[in-house]
Amino acid sequence: MGEPATLMHAFDRVVEAHPERVALLDTGRSGAPAVSYQELSRQVDAAAGVLRELGLARGDVLCNWLPNIREWMVLQFAAAHLGLLTVNLNTRFRARELHDVLATTEAAAIVLPTGFLSIDFAAITREVLGDDSPAQWRRRWPHLRAVIAVDASAEPRPDASASACGDLQVVDLAAALATADPARPPGEGGADDPVDAFTTSGTTGAPKLAMHRQRGVATHCHNVARAFDLRPGDRMLAALPLCGVFGFSGSMAAFLAGAGLVLQPVFDPDDAVVWFEAASITHAYGPDGMLRAILDAAEDPRALGSWRCGAFGNFTGDGAALAARVEDTLGVPMRGVYGSSELFGLMSLWPEDADRDERYLGGGLPVGPDIEVRTADPEDGTLLEHGQDGELQVRGYVVMAGYVGNEQATRATFTSDGWFRTGDFGRTREDGSLVYHTRLGDSLRLGGYLVDPAEIEEHLQSHPFVAAAAVVGVQQPGVGDAAVAFVETADGAELAADDLATFCRGRIAAFKIPARIELVDALPTVEGPNGVKIQRHELRRRGQELLDAPPSA
């Protein structure tokens, strides 16, 4: 069979081939967590009807703020069927990030969880939408038509539904599904329609949203399933958040290949070990720190004996040692990978039969034959030969359709001949593979997520007592980047570092809060041909000294 053209084409194909096979294990729920493909198909059809009744139609935007639970998958395919664009939100996002996304996307609906980690997502949403009069509120948010609540608690609770947001009454998804027409409504989602958008590092403070089309997602799932040898009946540990391309790419590929997903709403290494044994998990991949935690939690390595295929991202700088430990302990060949929000996760990986020294590098062979990679001089754009280090540039189905609501950023990231500028430093090889070295810019890898320092700086500078702020990353062994913020206070203002930490807490995602905030009289600058610039290399040096210094008594 050829590659599917749309997500629903791929979904219907796997449902028809394996109706009674387990599609996913919703481990965050008590009772019987197993859901078959046939049952999931019925829920997708009903959910599509609910979305249609709410007035959502082709081209509208649905913001999905759910953790890794069954409803995430249900709404993904229901939205794809109707031709909606799903913007995937990290559950760690708070008011600042939610506001930016809603304003950028002109979203028609938000799906939020209740009963998840004791976080009041409805309150955060109300804070963003405001308490204006209905008329004022509607002028501020003219496109928003619905807020959909999903009970994500382990035990269903009678008080789990959220209250009204603005002049919108929250729709309880479970109640709506119970009374929905079970027949699949007409759908308009086409192969060239945008279907998913993923947050990525911004350059002006707000996150950008990399948008992918249905054909690209379906093709990538097909190619990843082949590259990872995913077979019907296999099991994939879905502990990485589905809202990010690293978790999305492998999990969706497994799901559409008939290999059931073991969904973890929150990663827990002890729980992962239990499910490895109970569900005979065959495929697991992720950041080196996550996989290391699973190994540490397994008192008897035989509990992980079903593991057949693994891959890792070297996020903490210790990936090679972790990969060797997995191979030596379990005999599972580990492979480095490469990808990004603009290119999907798992865009490339190394062959299993390659030497260890090669397999442990970031990069690999593209998973699809129509993915092209080249390198160019980052200064003048001159194309480079194989083996020469430069900026990696990519062309093919994996490349995003563009940034949602940001045509200027979209234009800037493509070359005149249509190649995507990754902003990554690496080299290509004659066999078609690539080797990734590092980011070219100042992006930080915090908590496994790429973050532009400007996002954090802009929030700090919104404090009335802050005159200027600069954030740099300091590499910490076994941890990865740690954000260190240097802050100039406004004249005459009395401000403490703890005050700024409190100002960040609850307003931006926790992983973006700096590990250290240092108040300074002035940021170090230098006069250059293009104006005054902050000396970030000097701030990195100072940040390293601060984090290396022993704690004061």
Image (cartoon, helix red, strand yellow):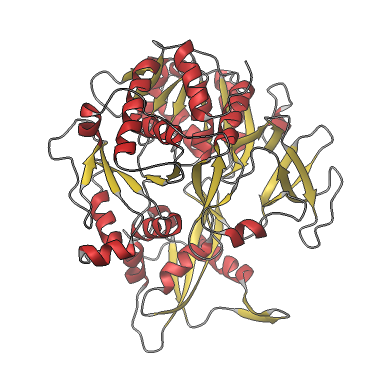
Q: Is residue 425 visible?
A: no
Outermost residue, front side: 186
Q: Nearer the viewer, residue 352 or 238?
A: 238
Determine which quarter of the picture holds residue 175: top left
Outermost residue, left side: 158
Q: Is residue 473 visible?
A: yes
Position of residue 421 relative to residue 239, above or below, is below
Determine which quarter of the picture holds residue 221: top right
**Left or right: 543 in relation to 527:** left
Question: Number of callouts in the render?
Answer: 0
Position of residue 90 relative to residue 100, above or below, is above
Image location (x, y in percent) of residue 204:
53, 66
Residue drawn at x 61%, y 41% is 339
Outermost residue, bottom side: 492
Q: Nearer the viewer, residue 94 or 470?
A: 94
Image location (x, y in percent) of residue 524:
58, 78
Residue drawn at x 37%, y 61% is 96
Q: Nearer the viewer, residue 225 or 59?
A: 59
Determine which quarter of the picture holds residue 310: top right
Report the quarter where the C terminus lies: bottom left
Residue drawn at x 15%, y 34% is 157
Residue drawn at x 23%, y 42% is 171
Report the quarter where the N terminus lies: top right
Image location (x, y in percent) of residue 126:
25, 57
Position of residue 142 relative to residue 492, above or below, is above
Image location (x, y in percent) of residue 343:
62, 42
Q: Nearer the viewer, residue 285 or 21?
A: 21
